[in-house]
Image: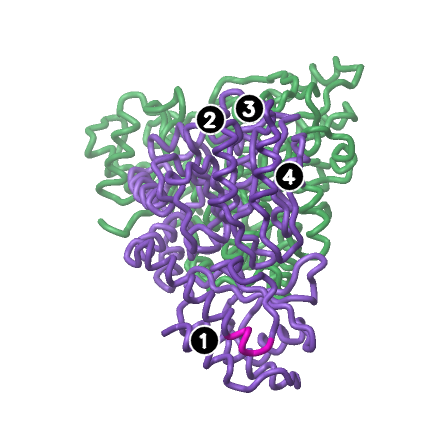
Chain colours: A green, B purple
Amino acid sequence: MDNKLMLMIPGPTPVPENVLLALAKHPIGHRSGEFSKIQAEVTANLKWLHQTQNDVLLLTVSGTGAMEAGIINFLSPGDRVLVGCNGKFGDRWAELAVAFGLNVDKVTAEWGQPLNPADFQAKLAADTAKEIKAVIITHSETSTGVINDLAAINQHVKAHGEALIIVDTVTSLGAVNVPVDAWGLDVVASGSQKGYMIPPGLGFVAVSAKAWEAYKTAKLPRFYLDLGKYRKDAAKNTTPFTPPVNLIVALQAALQMMQAEGLEGIFSRHLRLMKATRDAITALGLPLFAPEGAGSPAITAVAPTTVDAEQIRSVMKKQFDIVLAGGQDHLKGKIFRIGHLGFVSDRDVLTAIAALEATLLQLGYQGFTPGAGIAAAAKALL
Amino acid sequence: MDNKLMLMIPGPTPVPENVLLALAKHPIGHRSGEFSKIQAEVTANLKWLHQTQNDVLLLTVSGTGAMEAGIINFLSPGDRVLVGCNGKFGDRWAELAVAFGLNVDKVTAEWGQPLNPADFQAKLAADTAKEIKAVIITHSETSTGVINDLAAINQHVKAHGEALIIVDTVTSLGAVNVPVDAWGLDVVASGSQKGYMIPPGLGFVAVSAKAWEAYKTAKLPRFYLDLGKYRKDAAKNTTPFTPPVNLIVALQAALQMMQAEGLEGIFSRHLRLMKATRDAITALGLPLFAPEGAGSPAITAVAPTTVDAEQIRSVMKKQFDIVLAGGQDHLKGKIFRIGHLGFVSDRDVLTAIAALEATLLQLGYQGFTPGAGIAAAAKALL
């Protein structure tokens, strides 16, 4: 049905109506006092969401641009870095680090499995010369629906003492607990079209005092993504280059909603949505791609064997107006992914599971009792 | 009055209501067939606006990000470049080029004066070793309201034969004739919040075949701004990184409006608005900052001497709800700037001039006959 699409993908995520209306307001000048007030409020609320007193900087970029800024501002060519690779985005950071001449040492796990903190521990403990300058990981691996154990990996980074911890939190911030100060995370990068509940086009980078120390000697060339410029101007509630004014006004509205829900409310909602989704998928006899305990509260990947993943996506979209994500790279056609991140409620998960049951029935899938998915989800939502 | 602001600044420019409503539509997935169709239409219309068959690539950046992409993809550290500097933005490109290790040779003119094509001719003709790899200039210098003679400078670049011509058209594209193919412009960078009539957050780079040849050997590191990735994906109507979906849907609506008006209509409207503004300013006895023949069709800078520029801006905003731009850097307090770029009609210029007259009267300025500005503007609009 036209104009009826419901997004259950890991970004863009659904945008609340009041946020869309804020987005549609006439732009104001970005060098005005009015805009500086908005930037000040937004920055304060971003610090609240990041649970940090560190700088949280606003960039006109997608998530990859935020990650690039998080790497090129603090490292120099030849620097040894450990990069966690267990999905498309971990691989992307490795490619990015190689493109900037870093000496990349990959810590890998199979796609669909979490990174093993002990692998980091071993490499970090062996580095008595303190040559490892940074550990770069993806918190929630969007491509596989796996959450990596950031807290455990970070403890090994802290034991090393020298390396920075640089984290892609693109599909974790605003969905999962990321206590930046309590954990001492040095560089935390994210993007607007995920937990923030606004459209894509805005990136965020939180930077610790330790990272700013590294900035002083980092030698990669930079200008548009030079975070020092953003920090200097943020102190005056402005930006070095034109910010995406309308997206920031939308963000103001979205962050007010997040404050009203509270951090605990946001995190427990995402955990509940994950549990309901995973329990329902299991009840439908479909294999979960991420093992128990490693599922991302943002997204659930499903690896059906006796029914085609792309056919499921096709019926879900054509008949039920629900968009699910497919697999990426070598997982294309092998998995489908249900996003339950951002402006998603219990009702949305029930809706998606109900439509999935109807789709499975239509595709002749035999492995389930119709109604079993909804029964399991409803129980998880109790 | 609340919610009554009228922007007459050089960006963000006013956004048409139908474009704001397009912006506020629920986002769709950027990896969907629906979005690819929109990207295909938008790209075709961008080529029409650029008057080119070259690639025109979409980036999630501000204008500075587009310029950075336009420089780092085609040059290598140590490359000699001529950079035209006669305002804040020319100076910015020189800083950017220095930040990336280029060997910058500035061609300067006083702020408020146009660059002299003969200065480029002399340096290019003297370069028999063909060491100059690029000439980088700002077409419409937003900080001073001066338009540089791109056609004449470009002829000298073409006579040189080796150097690329890299142009910031941030406040000229969509307002002024920029025939990319007819002139053989190699790299043309612009931003969404100007002639395109949409909010900030989207950058554009048009790239010639000659520039793509230079890309093959250019050695600056790049990833997020690697235009080769954008070109490869644009061939499939997609992007390497998440695009700002809502801004692109808004751009689709804006480009349809521009097509309906036609290139000749757009260019002649901006020339008419410039003439009306300049004639009115002269009739009010206020000095124009850019000399006759060098005024930008996008923006008019005024340098009052017996009345304070900042006081004018203050009354215009507080009493008449019209936002004018101030001077930048050393011109702060010395000039004010009237933007007449993008979604601006004859009525808007009359409104601004009428309010300016009322403001001058209130500030006790003696140098004019009330009504003279409107009389001159009305005549110019005939």
Instruction: Classify residue A366 as left or right of residue A70.
Output: left
In the rendered structure, find residue A290 and report the number of the disc placed on it.
2
Quadrant position of residue B104: top right
Q: Chain of mark 2?
A: A
Q: Chain of mark 4?
A: B
| Amino acid tagged 1 | Ala
Front: mark 3 or 2 = 3
Instruction: Classify residue B68 as left or right of residue A142.
Output: right
Front: mark 1 or 2 = 1
For label 2, the crowd category at 10 Å Cα-Cα, with few meaning under 14, some 14 to 19 and many 20 or more, is many
Q: Nearer the viewer, residue B36 or B118?
A: B118
Are both tags, 4 and 2, on one chain?
no
N-term-proximal mark, 3 vs 1: 3
Q: Nearer the viewer, residue A189 or B332?
A: B332
| Amino acid tagged 4 | Leu
Membership of B284 in magenta stretch: yes
Q: Which residue is mark 4?
A: B96
Indicate the position of residue A359 as horizontal and vertical percent values: 24, 36
Indicate the position of residue B288 as horizontal and vertical percent values: 59, 67
Instruction: Classify residue A325 as left or right of residue B88.
Output: left
In the rendered structure, find residue B218 and report the number of the disc placed on it.
3
The residues bearing labels 4 and 2 have C-alpha atoms spaced at a distance of 45 Å
Residue A381, above or below B326: above
Quadrant position of residue B332: bottom right
